[in-house]
Image: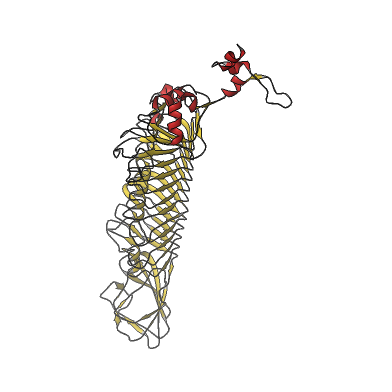
Amino acid sequence: MMHAELAASDGAALVGFSQGGLGAQSRTAQEKLREKVSVFDFLTDAQKADVEARTRLIDVTANVQSAIDASVGRELYFPAGDYLISAALTITLGSLTIACDRGQAQFVLGTENQNGLVIGDGTGTTKGLLYRTSVSGFNFVPRSGVSTFSEGACISVNNASYINIFFCTFYGSDGTTRRLWNGIYIFQGVSVNVEWCMFVSLVNHGVDQEGSAGLANWTTSGRIDNCEFSDFLGNGVHFGPFSGGCTINFPIMYSFFGTGVYVDSPGQGNNFIFEPDIEVDNSSNGIIVNQGAVIQIVGGWIGAGTINQSALLVNSNATDVQMMGTAVFGLSTTLNGQACSIVGCSIAGDFVTSRTGIVVNSTGSDAMIVGCRIKQFAHYGIQFANSPSGCVVSGCHFKNNTLGNVDGMNFNASFSPPVITGCTNDAAYSLTSAASLVLSVGKNMYGVTGATPNITSMTTLGIAQRVTIQAGLGGITFAGGGNIQLKNSPTTVPSFSTISFVSDGLNWFEDGRNF
């Protein structure tokens, strides 16, 4: 009789247990064992054998769902193995932790376009039940031969708050081609934290998040920390409409075909990208801000080998985008949005395929480029195209830019030309006398030597620029007729004497001489 009672399903309630140590209380073995649930508690022997052998022949969806429903408020443990599921597993009854020995348990998605794990059902009631739900250590993979997905996500967060996803790998290939759509999709999620995860070979995005109208329905306050992204066709991280106040820390991205980070959230912003490590290959781009405001990129590196794509592209519907302290190699940065800033960055071309370091187009008014080192571009260091208004370049260092350091500084009746101050470059301080003197941004004094033709024009260098010209042995002569306005014309500058000019962005006006 005792043997039968102990062998029954509640037999553990007849066995005592003590943790040992001062103050430890007596409990039953059943109480102790039920603190943590194993998914194997809900699988048949045949299912367990299939999981452990990783043969992926038996569907365990219903059994795993039963285990999840029975584990509210506790930890559900998954022993090592492959778990074939044909429909989404849902967490809606309350918070729990699902975990495994890191990387040893895999969810195998067996039906085209299915979700893997769904947290929340989109209702406010459920949202309040799921605080602190945690998913840790799993791999998500497609079943071999399943059709390529056009929707769905390995993990979908649907109107839930304070969700943690740690140490998961989202591997979208079945070994032959990319199959799975998104790694993680977050809709109306608050404080969803994704940390130490890997996103590989996905058809669409690594992390895709968006919300809906009304502040209570935004996706906000989330973190994506120390994650790695590679071989995806869409975007590593996609901020869609009504997502803001989110942070990406230390992302590593390489060998992809879309965009590392894509921000497309009209009217929203406050998204932050800290210390990115983005290797731009193929036809991809580093960071694109299509719509959004107050986006900050701080530190890190965005580079490529020989392909001239964009490290940062800000489109005209975006504003107040800042890139600070970032190293850029082999890529252009293009500003089409207003009030953007590039501060303290090292921006280098490769002399050959790279064109212009920073391009500011007509809609990129009020751009600030401050304290940057810009070098080795086959075209220009900075180009102001089609007269953007109110731009500032200050404290920049230019070197080895083939066509020139700054282009497009001319005065325009409708737009104020850029203000350029405190810059320097590698151009010589000495010029050979010619009818048109070629001046360079960052050099405020030149010695002019050689023959003495009538000098009629000088390169325009932006509004309020000043330059002092010193004549060499034999003197030089300035004459009117070009963009030089003299107090007396012609003016001959004696040997080793100086004459100074100030520019309105179009003409040079004599404002001083020492003879």
Image vertical order of residue 450 relative to residue 216, above or below: below
Observer-nearest residue: 133 or 117?
117
- Decide if residue 40 is on the left or right side of residue 234: right
- Decide if residue 260 is on the left or right side of residue 96: left
Spot occupied by residue 342 in the image (x, y as percentages of width and height) = 42, 55
- Decide if residue 436 is on the left or right side of residue 226: left
Across the whole image, how many numbered discs are drawn on residues?
0
Looking at the image, which residue sits at the far top? Answer: 1
Spot occupied by residue 497 in the image (x, y as percentages of width and height) = 42, 82
Spot occupied by residue 160 in the image (x, y as percentages of width and height) = 43, 29
Taking the spot 72% from the left edge, 27% from the top edge, the residue there is: 21
Image vertical order of residue 138 relative to residue 395, above or below: above
Image vertical order of residue 48 relative to residue 183, above or below: above
Looking at the image, which residue sits at the far left? Answer: 481
Corner quadrant of residue 14: top right
Tell me the quarter of the image containing the C terminus.
bottom left
Observer-nearest residue: 301 or 513?
301
Looking at the image, which residue sits at the far right? Answer: 22
Observer-nearest residue: 108 or 209?
108
Image vertical order of residue 159 relative to residue 392, above or below: above
Colouring of the image: secondary structure
Taking the spot 33% from the left edge, 49% from the top edge, the residue there is: 258
Q: Is residue 91 visible?
A: no
Tell me the quarter of the image containing the N terminus.
top right
Spot occupied by residue 9 in the image (x, y as percentages of width and height) = 54, 17
Q: Is residue 146 visible?
A: yes
Corner quadrant of residue 435: bottom left
